[in-house]
Amino acid sequence: MKALILAAGIGSRLKPWTDSHPKALVEVGGKPMLGHVIDRIIAAGISDIIVNIHHFAGQIVEYIRNARFMARITVSDETDRLLDTGGGLRKVIPLLANEPVLIHNADILTTFDLKKMIYNQVRSGADATLLTQHRDSSRRLVFDIDGRMHGWTDVKSGAVKPADLNLKDDMKLESFDGIHIVDPSLYPALQGYGKDNESFSIIDFYIDMCSRYDIRSLSLPDEDRWFDVGKPESLEQARHFISNSK
């Protein structure tokens, strides 16, 4: 299995810091977020990692070079055009050598053991596994009692995707946690989704494909912590957590 870290984001919510730095290098506990994510991926047994770059790309390249991680790290350059989460994955498919890929947003800090997710993916044989949790968010993914994805809903407006989605009482409404595993069985569909160098969201892809493919939820255990450090308030919470954990 390989890994892809999505580190190309502009990070507009972290201005003014991101006016001169990439979001992926914001520090938590004295270490750039990208370093936290790489270390956790290596700890899960993955040593072949791709990092996509766009905003202040040179700073990320320099950091990777100087940090000397015990892994083979390849850069996917999106400096000419930001491809979003789906387009970024589509671009690196030729580098994956038909192996599964664990995808991790660079702004997600969690105590969750990625080995558990890899084990779950192998055991289930799903086309994709998404780490999710039930948290305060208006936009949710919809899963049945067996964890299979059926679509998306906005719990405030009642909007659903696909348009014919039938929300049943026993369905789970979960928020995506920015970590997922994609099996090579999905690569042909990804390659046929849109055009080369086209920007699109991986969530839009999952919504469009969930009726044809086995896309499943893995719920974040209650004992684990999760932070989206792309938000200023969550960044401070993550820093406080790391500081108290030392």
Image (spheres, rainbow, N blue to C red):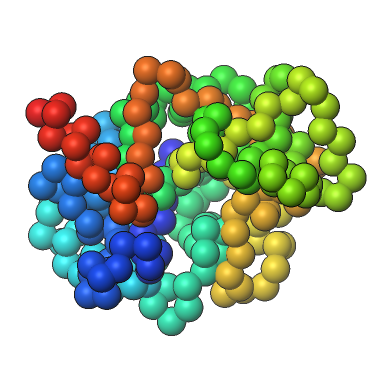
- Would residue 42 be found to the left or right of residue 9 on screen? left
Above or below residue 13? Residue 98 is above
Q: Measuring 36% from the left and 53% from the top, which residue is drawn there?
A: 231
- Would residue 133 be found to the left or right of residue 5 on screen? right
Q: Measuring 35% from the left and 28% from the top, which residue is drawn there?
A: 225
Say which quarter of the image contains residue 123.
Answer: top right
Above or below residue 73? Residue 71 is above
Query: Residue 154, can we see it?
Result: yes
Instruction: Estimate the x, y position of residue 80 in percent, counting from the top left.
Output: 43, 81
Above or below residue 163? Residue 77 is below
Position of the N terminus by quadrant: top left
Instruction: Estimate the x, y position of residue 53 in percent, counting from the top left.
Output: 36, 67
- Would residue 119 be found to the left or right of residue 27 on screen? right
Instruction: Give the residue at the far right of this rendering.
Output: 164
Say which quarter of the image contains residue 240.
Answer: top left
Instruction: Estimate the x, y position of residue 134 in percent, counting from the top left.
Output: 55, 29
Instruction: Estimate the x, y position of residue 136 in percent, counting from the top left.
Output: 53, 37
